[in-house]
Amino acid sequence: MESKKWHAHYPDTIPKSITYAEKPLHAFLQESAERNEHKKALHFLGKEMTYGEVYGEAKKFASYIQSLGMRKGDKVAIMLPNCPQAVISYYGTLMAGGIVVQTNPLYTERELKYQLLDSEAAFIVCLDILLPKVSKVNNTDLKHTIVTGIKDYLPFPKNLIYPFIQRKEYNMVVKVSQTENTHVWKNIMEYGIGDYAEVEVDPKRDLALLQYTGGTTGNPKGVMLTHYNLVANVQMCEAWLYKTKYKSQTVLAVLPFFHVYGMTTVMNFAVVQASKMVLMPKFNATDILKTIAKQKPTLFPGAPTIYIGLLNHPDLDKYDLSSIEACLSGSAPLPIEVQEQFEKKTGGRLIEGYGLTESSPVTHANFVWEKRVNGSIGVPWPDTDAKIFRMDSDQEEAEIGEVGEVAVNGPQIMKGYWKNKEETEKVLRNGWLYTGDLGYMDEQGYFYIVDRKKDMIIASGYNIYPREVEEILYEHDAVQEAVVAGIPDEYRGETVKAYIVLKEGRDISEEELDAFCRKHLAVYKVPKIYEFRKELPKTAVGKILRRKLVDEDKEKISHA
């Protein structure tokens, strides 16, 4: 590979170029199971499974969906939190020749229907408490629903107690019966056959994943990632964290697997290395601190909001976090004080990285054990190239230190957007993925992100598309004009703010608007702040100046 400025900082232990395995992603689960059949693969709320058991159940899942008519290239939506079923159905789908469509369990019916329609998913795997929501989504290509529950993998006596907890927490206990189109997970695992028909996969051509993401205009887009894209990125991760090869690792799985960041840096990484994953189905600071103290994880990929939440816990000093050796932080800028405090508390290393769904996702990171530059996203990973293109010319490279659009290329870059040639051509040009992020490179070859070209909001690591929220606000009959933007937030990175102009003579409270939005949007997309105005700033042609509103709020915050 052509030598780049940043290669001068690479230690001898990290290769600048890697020979990637040209095999399907699920082959790694088979290899890990064959080499480490009795090694612990998963820990879930007290229940543990070996690699042999996980592989065996993935084979049962693959066999079962094939018996239902699964064909190569069929889509399987997985609407699960971090739990054994999420790992088993993911790899089982790939083994059966399918394409995984990761689906956020927080989606509303409207959001779920859009994704199912667009992806043409024929199967969905969901929790029992989500079945009522899934059942209401009609007129899609969905043929089969496979239903599981948290209790299915809880140890005794937690499995007996959990239905009572579920009733109290969710005010429901869903009873699921096996029908022609509804299938009970427990039955599949108890009576299923482990023999499935192996499907020939071309790693560089065949898709493994449709991962939905988006921008500030239009609906979320399905990012097409091949087996090779995902294999390449996880092998880069393995090279970057080279010390993890020398001893058995335990990875804390707080990042959700339905997000490509958690999928690659936790689930796929752990499977490739035959490491143990400690699965956390939701973020709860107390539970995470207790789990770290008891399970002694060594690796902890996360996001700034996760580390902030733990550092601000009132009982932080009661827990021993010294097992943690390395943390890769992504999805939002990592405050230096958070980095320093977390390293002091754990004795491990917390470094910042960068990536996007379209790149599987990681493209840059600081070195874990070598030179790092605070405030920087680090340097490109092996076989990954990066450039800064000038704002006024997307073909002309910027000077050192000059801010422009960040572009990347490498084996982890997507094939394009599903059924969306126009949007694909906007971001994939001349072999480069134009990220929409503004940044610069310093004289040493370290990269920095200064702003986003797009108006997409990233709150607590979640991507939120302003237009989607605005369209819901406009559905309220009291709203005349609405614009949504992300404003700085110490905890979430950004938070969603809605600027509203009401129709003349109408009056509505923040509480009423909030309740309305919660009916139609996942909770993380609901505006946290509402500002009512008589008018909104606009251009001469009537376009609302979103950036001006954000700048006004930033100025208020800085004065405060």
Image: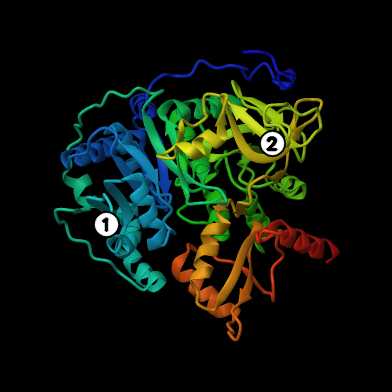
Local SS, label 1: loop
Is 270 placed above or below 221 here?
A: above
Label 2 neighbourhood size at 10 Å, few (<14), some (14-19), many (20+)? Answer: many
Task: Quarter of the image for the C terminus: give it.
Answer: bottom right
Local SS, label 2: strand
> Residue, x 48% and y 62% (percent of image)?
522
CB of mark 2 within 8 Å of CB of mark 1? no
> Residue, x 41% and y 70% (percent of image)?
169
Quarter residue 222 falls in: top left
Whether residue 361 can be seen here:
no
Task: Quarter of the image for the N terminus: give it.
Answer: top right
Q: Residue 184's x, y, as percent? A: 22, 53
Give whichever of discs 2 and 1 has the lower sequence position: 1
> Residue, x 67% and y 45% (percent of image)?
453
How did the renderer colour the structure?
A: rainbow
Q: Nearer the viewer, residue 90 or 28?
A: 90
Q: Residue 343's x, y, as percent? A: 71, 44
Is 456 placed above or below 211 here?
A: below
Relative to 329, is 414 on the left or the right? left
Whether residue 150 can be seen here:
yes
Q: Residue 504's x, y, as percent? A: 61, 82
Quarter residue 452 falls in: top right
Q: Nearer the viewer, residue 315 or 427?
A: 427
Q: Residue 496's x, y, as percent? A: 62, 62
Q: CA distance from mark 2 to mark 1?
A: 41 Å
Residue at numbered disc 1 = 139
Amino acid type assigned to the residue bearing label 1 in the image? Asn
Residue at numbered disc 2 = 405
